Image (cartoon, grey):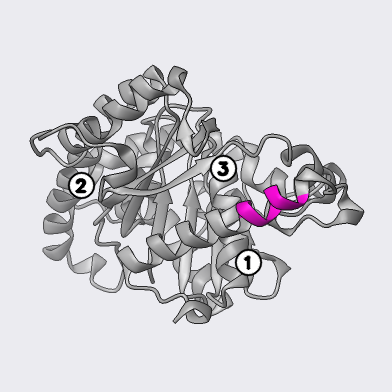
Amino acid sequence: MTTVAFFNNKGGVGKTSLVYHLAWMYADLGVTVVAADLDPQANLTSMFLDEWEMDDLWSPSPPRETVHGALLPLLEGISDISTPATLMPRPGLSLVPGDLSLSVAEDEFSGQWPLCLDRNVRAFRVISALSRILQQAREEAEAELVLVDVGPNLGAINRAALIAADFVVVPLAPDLFSLQGLHNLGPTLATWRHGWEQRLEQARMTEGLKALELPAGRMKPIGYVVQQHAVRLDRPVKAYARWMDAIPGEYRSAVLKKPGGRNKQVEYDKHCLGLLKNYRSLMPYAQDARKPMFFLKAADGAVGGHVNAVRDCYYDYRDLACAIADRIGVPCPQLD
């Protein structure tokens, strides 16, 4: 299973929209994909479903067909996780729906983390639960790729979600807050990775864990994506230039723990996976049509100048999807 988490502890950087559009793009390119909503705010799920569908999904009668529903038997001490329910918005694309109730599991994930060092079997079951749910969803969908949306925080649920990830992409906005977020994100990833390695050592010496499939916890950073920047004559406007210029060095020092080196423009930084323009004018139409911005048609309201914006949006996301795929060893079949 190849799992990519999109993570920034600073909110408002377009992370959920990025996962949503990339999931649709990979399916369009012929890469079978699972989009997993592990953010207790469930914003990714709300992009796929309308309010009536979500009302049915979040029925008060358990178990819900969400990620929390799959966790519930383990959290209640009844059994292990159950098989996660998935939705299929289109062929080749499956969704593991999110749930506001997932937030109540924060204390459980937090409390079980130190118990892993005592070789507590249930602790390992809890901490690896999200990884095993993703694995089951991938197997059911026969997917090549899992994209994971997580919340903008450094809490215990996110730690369990990131342990399930092979790779990490950092969405950024060209502002001071995104740069400050990198100061926390880089050291946190390193701490989580090291902490899980210690726990895996204990698991290898525990007889009751030999049959439990535990994630490797690689969470390797493969680059960043800059979103929501305005451009003029194909260059960032002056208001963003200061923050754009600071991103390459900050990413190297905070996330990769390498010297910042010479100042580089984002466009020429090998760690920049892509620059996404601000397609704000398309988003209301996409939300109404419940489809990605790059699939909008005239019937959806994409007329006049929007036609060129839709086309440009498609190519931007296609190039980004293939750049990520290249870093993680997943081919984009239609572009080979």
Specify the amino acid type for callout 1: Ser
Whether residue 108 is situated above or below residue 35 in the rendered picture: above
Residue denoted by label 3? 16
- In this view of the protein, can residue 123 be seen by the observer? no
Q: Nearer the viewer, mark 3 or mark 2?
A: 3
Categorize mark 1 by other alpha carbons within 10 Å: few (<14), some (14-19), many (20+).
Answer: many
CB under 8 Å between discs 3 and 2: no
First in residue order: circle 1 vs circle 2: 1
SS at badge 1 = strand
Q: Which mark is residue 193?
A: 2
Residue denoted by label 1? 94
* Quadrant where the image shows the N terminus: bottom left
Whether residue 300 is situated above or below residue 192 in the rendered picture: below
Q: Position of residue 55 (x, y in %)?
A: 82, 44
Marks 3/1: CA–CA distance: 16 Å
Specify the amino acid type for callout 3: Thr
Q: Residue at x 25, y 66 (%)?
A: 209
Specify the amino acid type for callout 2: Arg
CB under 8 Å between discs 1 and 2: no
